[in-house]
Image: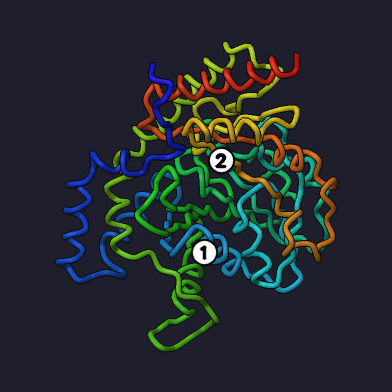
Amino acid sequence: MNMNRPVPLLDVPRGNAPLREEFLEALANVLDSGRFLFGPDVKQLEEECARWSNTRFGIGCASGSDAILLSLMAMGLREGDEVICPSFTFFATASAVSRLGGVPVFVDIDRNTFNIDPAKLREAITEKTKAVIPVHLFGQCADMDSIMEICDEYGLVVIEDAAQAIGANINGRPAGAWGHFGCISFYPTKNLGGMGDGGMIVTNDEDLQDRVRLYSGHGMRPRYYHKVIGINSRLDSMQAAVLNVKIQYLDDAVSGRQKNAQLYTKLLQESGLQNEITTPVSQYGDGHVWNQFTIRVHDGKRDDLKAFLAERNIGSEIYYPVPLHMQKCFRPLGFQPEDLPETLLASREVLSLPIFPELEEEEIRIVVDSVKQFFAMSQRRAA
C-alpha cells in the first residue's frame, strides 16, 4: 500500500470519465435541437426523479436552494410565519424562509443521525408555525414516521430537504415521498450531480405542482399575463441531458457508496479508536445513500486530525463548522449557542471522509491508516 498516494475528498472527473461519450452525444443532441429550455430532456428528467421518489410529479428548477424557495412560495408562506428546521444544515434550508419574510425556528438534532429530533420539533410548535423542513442530512432520511405524525396532528406543511438524499428511503419509501414537497439538488458534489446548478421538486399533489410551475416562471400564465409575483427558476436542457445519462447509473453509484461505507465502518471499528472517534450509523439499513461519511472526533482533536490528513494530501471536510443559529445573519432571531447543545457538539466534532463511489479499497485503507497514525502520535505526545 502506497501511503504517499493522495486521496481526494471527491473526484468528479474520475466519476464522469466512463460516461464521456454518452455525455457528448446527449449534449450534441440538445445543441442540434436548439431547445435549450423547456425541451424533452427536462420532461424526461422530471419523470425519472418522480419515479425515483415514488411521487406523481417532478418539477425542474435552477437549484436545490430554489426548490425550497419555490415550495415555500407555493404553500403560501407569509411574513411572520414560523418554519421549523434544524440548525445543523446548509444555509439554503433556512435562508429561503427568511427571504420570504418567514421566521426560521431552529431545533436540535439527534446525536446518532445528525437529523432533526422529533421531540424537539414538537416542543417548538406555536400558533405561528406553518411548516417544517426536515433535512435528510448526509444521505440518511430523518425520522419521517414521527415527523409526519406530529405535522399531521398540527396541520403543518412538510417540505423535505432531500438535497443530499435522492434514493434514500425508510423501509422502501423514498425521500421526497413523505411530505407535501421533496427538494433535490443536482450540485456537482451530490450523488446525482450535474455539470453546474440544478434542482428538482417532487410532489404527489397536482395543485401544488401547478403552483410550483407558476411561481417558477415569473407567475406568468398565459404568456405576459402575471397572476402572482414569481421568480425565474428553470432547469435547462443541457443540465437535464447530462443528468438523464447519470441517473441511469445512480443505482450503481449508491451501491458503491454503501460498499465504501461498510469498509470504512469495519476498518475503523477494528482500529481500536472507539474512545477517539464515533463512526456514523445507518438507522434504516440500506436506506442510507451516503452522500457523506461523517465521523465524530472527540476531545477537541477534529481540527488537528483534518490538518494531519491534509498534510498527507487526504481530503476531508467539516459539514458544518458554524450552525445556522450561530450565523451572524440569524443573530436577530435571538438564539444562543448553548440553546441547541447537540448541534453545537456536532459542529465541533464532525469530519467527513472521502466516500465517492469510484474510491478504491486501497484509498480507503490509506485514509483509515492515516487516522490511526494521527491518534498513535497523539497518544505518544500525551505520554
Badge nearest the viewer, 2 or 1: 2
* Quarter of the figure with the C terminus: top right
Q: SS at mark 1?
A: helix
Marking on residue 66: 1
| Residue visible at 19% across and 66% down in the picture | 31
What amino acid is found at the position of numbered circle 1 in the picture? Asp
Q: SS at mark 2?
A: loop
Mark 1 closeness class: few <14, some 14–19, many ≥20 residues within 10 Å: many
Where is residue 182 shown, x and y percent of the image?
53, 52
Q: Quadrant of residue 83?
A: bottom right
Where is residue 341 shown, x and y percent of the image?
81, 40
Residue at the spot of label 2: 317
- Looking at the picture, does residue 354 appear above or below residue 362? below
Q: Earlier in the sequence, mark 2 or mark 1?
A: 1
* Quarter of the figure with the N terminus: top left
Where is residue 134 shown, x and y percent of the image?
64, 48
